[in-house]
Image: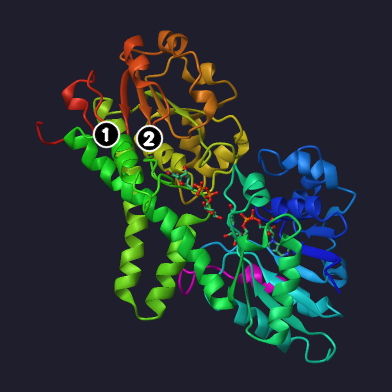
Amino acid sequence: MPIQKICCIGAGYVGGPTCSVIALKCPDIKVTVVDKSQERIDQWNSEKLPIYEPGLYDVVKQRRGENLFFSTDIDNAIKEADLIFISVNTPTKTFGNGKGRAADLKYVESAARMIAEVANSSKIVVEKSTVPVRAAESISNILTANTFNKPNVKFQILSNPEFLAEGTAINDLLYADRVLIGGEDSAEGHAAIEELCKVYERWLPRKNILTTNTWSSELSKLAANAFLAQRISSINSLSAVCETTGADVSEVARAVGWDSRIGPKFLQASIGFGGSCFKKDILNLVYICEGLNLPEVAAYWQQVIDMNDYQKSRFSAKVIESLFNTVTDKRITLLGFAFKKDTGDTRESPAIDVAKTLLDEGAKLHVYDPKVEHSQILEDLTHPQVTEEPEHVRKSLTIHSDPYEATAGTHAIVLCTEWDEFVSLDYQRIYEGMMKPAYVFDGRKILDHQKLQSIGFIVQTIGKRLSRNSPNRVWGSKAQI
Ligand code: NAD
Ligand code: UDX
């Protein structure tokens, strides 16, 4: 029997968009996205969705109430489903064994236990969450151990990691490069893989669907994120070399990426990568390697994270150094707080690191982001992992809804997110309202630096010496070149 009802446990950045697109492309399949958070489900059922993602609302509006449902009635959705996606969060553990490295699988485990408890018919259970290698085995063990009294209920566990990126999720889902499905090498396993293939084949060519064994699929997801992050750390490491030698990292990236074996994507030097996935998944990979007694492999991947931390702190340090080594009581404007453009997500945003350093140094911070909720910025910057003095942060922080207000009377602009609207701001107007000398630190390399300099700004960016800046303001330059 083809799949008729799908349940997705976890209505987050992955579960929501993925299932909305499945509902759009498979109008005859009933798709129910469930979550334990009533607030999240209420938002999915409202006009203001819990996440900002271009194109998402249009898809939801078309299918919601038709064959797409958002609900907290998890039991019922599990009971009626033929196929269940587990799309819950798998954050880095913050306590106990593997603290700060291992993936915390408590939400995956609780989802598996709920399925075991309420299922009264056989199900295909699909790991959509990013998990350590062999997590499917643990899910399988939980399911079988808890359904020994239901002999007619059988489970097939598939791994179907998600490769969407935030900000482009709908496009990524509609035109996926590849869908990866891993399953058990048995007749039942192959049949389950085939059922899931049939869902994706409704809108993607079969050649884009890759099938593997379960463990290859699980590891490939961690590997793909590690490779992508590695490219960013590689180009960021070279940005430091560029700043001291006079090479331009954009030119280097272009020249290197022109080689068809290397390719041009993911070579954009920046203040460092953020987002909920890269750091978490590489830490997970490092932890797995250590557990397998492969310390050299663990150290190799750890370096991708270390280089990212270095890039973030190098940027913040340079801001302070350029502002005459003190930012105490200086007004500084952060343009952008999300971890990348076209999302309101701030998880692991490099802007948090930059803001923390500046606040610790006594700066008065003014923050503007087009999509991040003000309450989220406050929550991030007063989080116990960021400050021991939340009151100090509250007093030193102003969050704005308008970029011109945010920059008025400020000493420096620090651009942390590459939002398109920042390119077309009226910088002449901004310059006139700022303290002098007026600084711009372009952490994303999106602004017209020559134009800014001709207005009068002192401009710093990543991986490039700007000729009209005074020599003592060259990033990281100790040598006289
Ligand atoms: P998220 O935090 O946005 O959403 C997870 C949701 O699961 C939350 O709403 C939470 O309330 C819910 N949840 C947790 N346990 C539950 C339970 N037992 N029952 C019902 N609901 C439960 O997370 P996300 O960003 O969507 O990520 C989900 C998974 O997908 C993670 O493993 C992540 O690594 C992976 N992933 C994320 C992205 C991304 O861009 N965010 C991309 C690819 C893969
Ligand atoms: C990433 C993966 O791309 C996606 O396949 C996976 O499913 C989830 O993790 P995401 O974190 O949403 O997606 O965004 P991504 O576009 O990968 O950007 C991650 C971070 O790297 C952002 O902070 C971005 O600004 C930064 N980045 C990206 C760079 O600094 N330079 C680049 O060239 C590309």
Give the residue number, with chain letter if any, for mark 2: 358
- Say which element carries label 2: helix
The kind of residue tagged 1 is Asp
Q: Main secondary structure of the magenta part?
A: loop
74 on left or right of 218: right
Residues in magenta, as a range: 95-112
Distance from disc 2 to disc 1, alpha carbons, whole Å, reads: 27 Å
Instruction: From the top left corner, tell me how far across and down residue 196 is, in percent.
Output: 73, 68
Task: Using a 10 Å C-alpha cutoff, classify the residue at mark 1 as few (fewer than 14 neighbours), some (14 to 19) or many (20 or more).
Answer: some
Q: Residues within 10 Å of mark 2 (few under 14, many from 20)?
A: many
Point out the frontmost of discs 2 and 1: 1
* Residue nearest the viewer, comparing 446 with 346: 446
| Residue position marked by numbered label 1 in the rendering | 248
Observer-nearest of 185 and 79: 185
Q: Is residue 364 left or right of residue 235?
A: right
From where the camera sits, is residue 93 visible?
A: no
Q: Relative to 59, does residue 195 appear above or below in the rendering?
A: below
Above or below: residue 21 compared with residue 455: below
Q: Determine if the C-beta at disc 1 is less than 8 A from ligand 2.
A: no
182 relative position to 46: left or right = left
Quarter of the N terminus within the rendering:
bottom right
Q: Is residue 111 visible?
A: yes
Q: Residue furthest left?
A: 480
Q: In x, y percent, where is residue 76?
A: 88, 67
User: The C terminus appears in which quarter of the rendering?
Assistant: top left
